[in-house]
Structures are given as C-alpha cells and as structure tokens.
Amino acid sequence: MKRFAVPAALLSAGLLVSACGSTDTATRDMSSTSSMSAMPTESQDPATSPAADHNDRDIWFAQMMIPHHRQALEMAKLAEGRAAGSKVKELAKQIEAAQDPEIQMMTGWLESWGVQAPGEDGMPMDHTDHGMPGMMSGEDMKKLEGLKGAAFDKAFLTMMIQHHEGAITMAKEEQGAGIYEPATQMAGSIITSQSAEISTMRKLLK
C-alpha cells in the first residue's frame, strides 16, 4: 500500500500543475484576444473620404454643361450686332451674365476633382454630342450667324428655347443623381432661371 501512495501523490500533483498550466495558457489567450479586439481599427467609411463629396453624375454634369453654356454664350454674343428688338438684346446680355460665371465655377470643380475640363488643352467639344440635349449643330450656328433683324430675332428665340430646354433636362438629371451640393444647387438655379427665360422668349415670339 505504501508503494502506491507516493506515485499517487505525485500523479495528483502532476495533474494539478497541468491544470494550472492549462488555465494560465487559456487566460493568456483570452487576454491576448481581448487586447486585439480592444485595439482601434482604421475607419474606411467611404462617405467621409475626400472623394465621396462628388460622384460620376456630378462630373458628367460639369463636363456637359460647360460646352452647353459656351454655345449659349456664342449665340448671345451674335445678338449684339444682329438683333432688331431691344428686349432680345437684353435677354442675350442676361444669358451672358448668368452663364459665364457658371462656366468658371464648373471648371473649378473639375480641376479640384482632377478631371480635365472640356475645351482645355485641345480637348474636343462636339456640339452634336447626344449627351447634351438642346445643342445646336454647326449648320444651325452658321445659319444664325448669317441672319439679321427680325429674322435673327425669331431664329435666336426659337433656338434658345430649345437650348434652354436641353439645359433644364440635364439639370434635372443632376438633381436626381448628383451628390455634390454646389452642383445640385446650380442645377436648381438653372431650372428656375432658364424656365423663366423660356416663358419670356415664348412671349417675345408671339
């Protein structure tokens, strides 16, 4: 009986040490896991990233509206020496005053986004681009340039109504899908101001 007492005691002690060792290891593992879970992780929320303040629709809006506005300015400048009616000339100046600053603003947006503005560094501008509703063809512009007096007034008003309607369509698309607040605000301004100008031009045509 005495021969077995010592090994039993040793075995009991060995089991106790083993159990303590397992407990210590588990405690260390749990502590390590807890420390890792407590470590702060870097946020990748796209809503707060620098590029999240605009989207592809905002870029499209600026890239398309710049040449659209530029053509309106070309038409408006023709009115100065060709229009017969003083109200048509006043309207042309109003269009220039509104759209030229908007071109500068949209160009600034594109530059800040690292996107080339249309018409810069040889970037082509196609006045017949199907992505720009209301644009006049090169033939339309030549026709307008060759008119004077009442004939010019009628053609100018008719073409500018179509041009404005195209701009309003583009502005509504920006409001529906754009996220850049200055762009959506400009779109709202275009809708309001150009809708009012369309009403004026329709009255002048009558």
Image: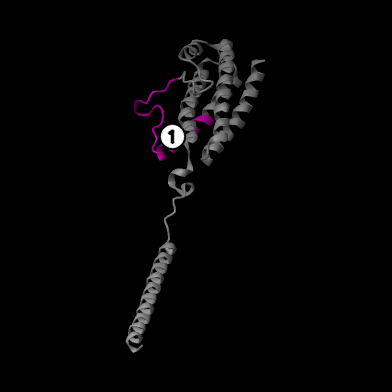
Q: Position of residue 178 (x, y in %)?
A: 53, 36
Q: Which residue is mark 1?
A: 107
Whether the magenta-drawn stretch holds residue 124 is answered as: yes
Q: Position of residue 62 (x, y in %)?
A: 47, 32
Of residue 54 and residue 189, the one placed in the foreground of this image is 54
Work out which residue is located at the far front of the displayed protein and give it: 1
Of residue 44 and residue 162, the one placed in the foreground of this image is 44
Query: How are the colours assigned in the image?
Result: one colour
Q: Quadrant of residue 151?
A: top right
Q: Is disc 1 placed on a helix, strand or loop?
A: helix
Task: Tell me what residue is drawn at x 37 percent, y 26 percent.
Answer: 123
Q: Position of residue 187 (x, y in %)?
A: 56, 34
Of residue 12 and residue 69, the one placed in the foreground of this image is 12
Work out which residue is located at the far bottom of the displayed protein and give it: 2
Task: Tell me what residue is drawn at x 59 percent, y 28 percent.
Answer: 194
Whether the magenta-drawn stretch holds residue 34 is answered as: no
Q: Position of residue 27 (x, y in %)?
A: 41, 71
* Residue 176 position (above or below residue 85): below
Q: Quadrant of residue 29?
A: bottom left
Q: Quadrant of the N terminus?
A: bottom left
- Magenta highlight: main SS: helix
- In magenta, the rendered stretch is 97-126
Callout 1 crowding tier (Cα within 10 Å): few <14, some 14–19, many ≥20? many
Q: How many marks?
A: 1
Amino acid type at circle 1 is Thr
Q: Quadrant of the C terminus?
A: top right
